[in-house]
Image: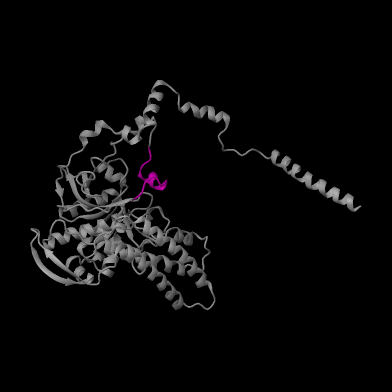
Amino acid sequence: MKKLLILTAAALCIALPVQAQKKNAASPAPTGGITSDMMVQIKKGYTGSASDKALRNILVSNSPAKLALNHENATAFNSHFSNRVESKAVTDQKSSGRCWMFTGMNVLRSKAIRQHHLPADFQFSQAYTFFYDQLEKANLFLQAIIDTYKQPIESQEVTWLFKNPLGDGGQFTGVANLITKYGIVPKEAMPETFNTNNTSSISNLIALKLREDGLELRDMAARKGVTPQQLNGRKTEMLAVVYRMLALTFGEPPAEFVWEQKNAKGETVSTETYTPMSFYEKFAKQDFTQYYMVMNDPTREYYKVYEIQYDRHVYDGQNWRYLNLPMEEIAPMCIASIKDSTMMYFSCDVAKFLDREKGFMDMNNYDYESLLGTTFGMDKKQRVASFASGSSHAMTLCAVDLDKEGKPLKWMVENSWGSSYGYQGFLIMTNAWFNEYMFRVVLEEKYIPANIRDLLNQKPVMLPAWDPMFAPEQ
C-alpha cells in the first residue's frame, strides 16, 4: 500500500506541470507586441530607394546635427544689440555643474566692478562658496533622513533622498542663502583646484559616504530611547568627515585674509585684512528679499506662486519659489532691467537648436524634418509635460535688441564656459527661441510692475522634489 501511495504521488508530481502547461497554453496571447503582420507594415518606413540609400550612407558616418545645419539660416546671425549691459571678463566653470553659482555671482560681480571701480577681470571665489554649498547640502540630506525615518525606505520621498544625496547643480536662492550665511571672498583668497573645476569624482565619493551615513541614521533614529541630541551628535561627526574630504580636495576656506584692492587701471588702492563676512558687507551686500524668480511653465496655472520641496542648498534656508507667468509678462521686465544696466540670473534649455560654433540659438538652425522625413511638432507645454524639455543651464542675461516699436528681436547672455566658446563667450538667441526655451529669470523688485508684485504675496503651492521643474541648473 505504501509503495502504491508513493507511485501515485510521483505520478501526480509529473502530471501537475503538464496540466499547468496546458492551462497556460489555453491563455489568450498578450496583445501590444510587434506581430509579423505589423513588421511588414513597419518596414515600409524605409523603402530602400536611391534617396534612402544615399541618406543612409551619409548618416551612418555623421551626426544628424552636422547634416541638418540649415545653411539658409546663416544670414540670421548678427551681434548688434540696441541695449546691452557692459560685461567684463567671461568666466569658466570648467567640468563642473556650477553654472548657477557662476551666474549668480556674475550678477553680483558686475555690480561690484561698477560700484567700486574694480578691474574687469575681478571675480569672487567660486571655490569658497562651493565648499559650503557641498557641506550644507550634505547636512540637508542627513537631516532630511532623520526627519523622515518613520517613513518606509521605499516611500517616494525617502527614495528620492537616497537617489539625490548630493549634487553640484543649483539655483539663485542657493547663492543668496550661502553668501549671507558664510560671506564671500575674492578669487585670490581661495582659488580653484582640480576638484572644484572637475567636481564629479569627489561629489560621487561624498554621495557614497552620505548614503552609508543615511542608512545608519535611519536605523539609529528608529531605536527606542535614542534622543534628538544623540542623533545630532552623530550627524555632526558624519559632517566632520565630509568637511575633511572637502578640505583635502578644495582647500580649507579662509577665516581671514589680506587683499590688495586695485582700480580699473590696475593700480593698488588699498591693502586690508578682511573676514568673509566683512568682505561681503563691503563688496557684495544685497537685500536678497528684493529679488524674485519668475518662470514660464505652461503646464501649470499662470499668475500663481509655486515652491519646490527640498529645492534649497541650506537646511535652514529657503526653497526656491517662483511666480509662473506667460512670456508676454516676463519680456518687458527683462527689458526694463537691461535698460537700467542690471544683469539678471537666467536659465533655459541651452542645448536645443544651439549652433555651438557661432553661439547662436535659433529655431531654424537645424532642419531635422527635411533630413529625416518626419515632423517634430510638440509645443512648449507638451515638451515640458513629456520631459522633452526643461531648464538645464543658467547664464547671465545682459542684452536685448529692440525693433522700432520696442519689441525684442533677439537676446544675449554671458555664459560661463570660457571666452572661446560661442560668440566670444556669449550666446545669442532669437526672440522666438527665447519664448520656447527660456524658463527662469531672477528680477529685482523695482523692475516688476505693481500688479505683478502683489501676486508674489500669495501662499505658494508646494510641489514635490521629484517635480520636473526641480531639475537644478548645471
User: Is residue 237 left or right of 19 when viewed as pictured?
Assistant: left
Q: Residue at x 32, y 62 (%)?
A: 249
Instruction: From the top left corner, tell me how far across and down residue 165 is, in percent.
Output: 42, 61
User: Is residue 88 left or right of 209 when viewed as pictured?
Assistant: left
Tally of marks = 0
Identity of the residue furthest to the right in this view:
1
Q: Quadrant of residue 160?
A: bottom left
Q: Residue at x 13, y 65 (%)?
A: 261
Q: Is residue 433 above or below residue 187?
A: above
Predominant secondary structure, magenta span: loop
Q: Would residue 172 be visible to someone looking at this image? A: yes
Q: Would residue 449 be visible to someone looking at this image? A: no
**Which residue occupies the foreground of this view, 121 or 35?**
121
**Which residue occupies the foreground of this view, 424 or 112?**
424
| Colour pattern | one colour
Instruction: From the top left corner, tell me how far across and down residue 251 is, in percent.
Output: 29, 65
Instruction: From the top left corner, tell me how far across and down residue 198 is, in percent.
Output: 32, 55
- The range drawn in magenta is 377-391
Q: Residue at x 42, y 21 (%)?
A: 49
Instruction: From the top left corner, tell me how far across and down residue 407 is, in percent.
Output: 19, 44
In magenta segment, residue 387: yes
In magenta segment, residue 273: no
User: Is residue 275 left or right of 304 when viewed as pictured?
Assistant: left
Identity of the residue furthest to the top in this view:
50
